Image (cartoon, rainbow, N blue to C red):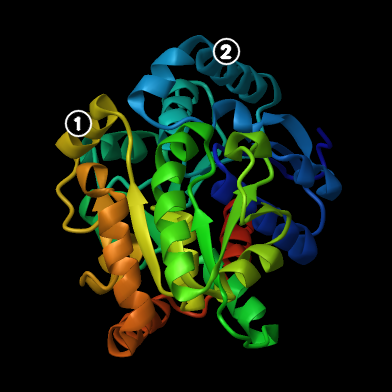
Amino acid sequence: MNPNRKSIFLVCGESSGNKHAVDFIREYISTFGDADFTAIGSEEMKSFGVNLLFSYTDINLIGFTSVLKNFKKLKDKLNQAIRFINDTSPDAVILLDSPGFNLRLMQNIRSFYTGKIIYYISPQLWAWHKSRVKIIRDCCDLMLVIFPFEVNFYKREGVKALYTGNPLVIRIDKFLSSYEERPKTKITLLPGSREEEIIKILPVFLKAGMLLAKEFNLQVQIVYPEQINPEIYGNLADVKIIKNTSNELFYTSIADSALVLTKMGTASLECALIGTPFITGYKTNFLNYSIAKFFTDLKYLTMANILIDKPVVKEFIQNDFTVDNIISEGRRILSDEEYNAQMVYGLRKVREILTDKDASSEAARIIHSLLK
């Protein structure tokens, strides 16, 4: 590494965290000049001169059973990251979400690593398995959060946390400023960014979406992440399958839709900020569900509902995740104008709660200041 520049190691474990990391790198270089970046991330990062240690898809797993099946691979990748930090001593290690990997990484490096450990995009420790916050308190120098309520959560736990704004806000505001309204002719399916999720979620979304599309004369489309092999979707007649190659394409697909059926996660918040009515759902195997349920006591699991503390969007989880339930709610959204308008109004409240701060710019400024 060049001794005259700051060296920064970023760790992403899934697609949304990777997008936020790319935005951060772009903003940091634009504002403060080059740094020596190394990352667990995506090929896209190489265009900014980033050294890619390995792809985030190598550790992009969810659920207890998936981790068990891939335990040796995950351990090897964890050790590779630990060795890199030990050998190169970067000025900062920046972790983005993905607590399964990143909390273990923090614990393993804190005893020998003397640089700054910064968490940007907090894992949702306030939602489940809150006991893990002790790891953050013991190992992390600074927590940068993207939801306002997270600051108080960490303050109560004795962790220094700063709110950067939410990176989706500026990104989506920019998209909406140039988007031209057109007839909403689509039902968009977003069944996840991991194969194990898609296998569980897509069949229900697909059957419900096709029946609703037939009833309301709409077109079903699936937008899939670049890292997913499209063969997983099979040969689907009357369904448009779109590879997600850019934010603009993804957001246009959502904005052109009368309804989106989405897995819980970042995509649901993107739907909320764009203002498109949506239904969230999730299903996993019994063991994963039982473990997750044991560790959480939240009223809601969809971020839009959490932020406004009201069930503005229907959530169908596990046994409630059925074709009949989704069709019933979808039919109401598509046929009841007053109900539809109430949902859209509720989604606007989400945007009001999240400030106009440019999260990537704010994170770059804070981290640069910390490394002076």
**In terms of image quadrants, where is residue 103?**
top left
Q: Nearer the viewer, residue 333 or 279?
A: 333
Left or right of residue 365, residue 63 in this image:
left
Answer yes or no: is residue 246 visible.
yes
Q: Is residue 101 above or below residue 121?
A: above
Q: Which residue is mark 1?
A: 290
Left or right of residue 299, residue 184 in this image:
right
Answer yes or no: is residue 154 visible.
no
Residue at image point 42% right, 70% down = 215
Q: Amino acid at mark 1?
A: Ser
Q: Amino acid at mark 2?
A: Asp
Image coords of residue 56 (percent x, y):
62, 34
Q: CA distance from mark 1 to mark 2?
A: 28 Å
Residue at image point 53% right, 62% down = 188
SS for callout 1: helix
- The numbered dot on residue 311 is none
Give the mark nearest the N terminus, 1 or 2.
2
Image coords of residue 167 (percent x, y):
55, 65
Count of number-bearing discs? 2
Residue at image point 59% right, 75% down = 256
Q: Nearer the viewer, mark 1 or mark 2?
A: 1
SS for callout 2: helix
**In terms of image quadrants, where is residue 168?**
bottom right
Looking at the rendering, in which quadrant would you find the N terminus?
top right
Mark 2: few/some/many CA within 10 Å (<14, 14-19, 20+):
few
Image coords of residue 226 (percent x, y):
69, 44
- The numbered dot on residue 76 is 2
Mark 1: few/some/many CA within 10 Å (<14, 14-19, 20+):
few
Q: Nearer the viewer, residue 8 or 341?
A: 341
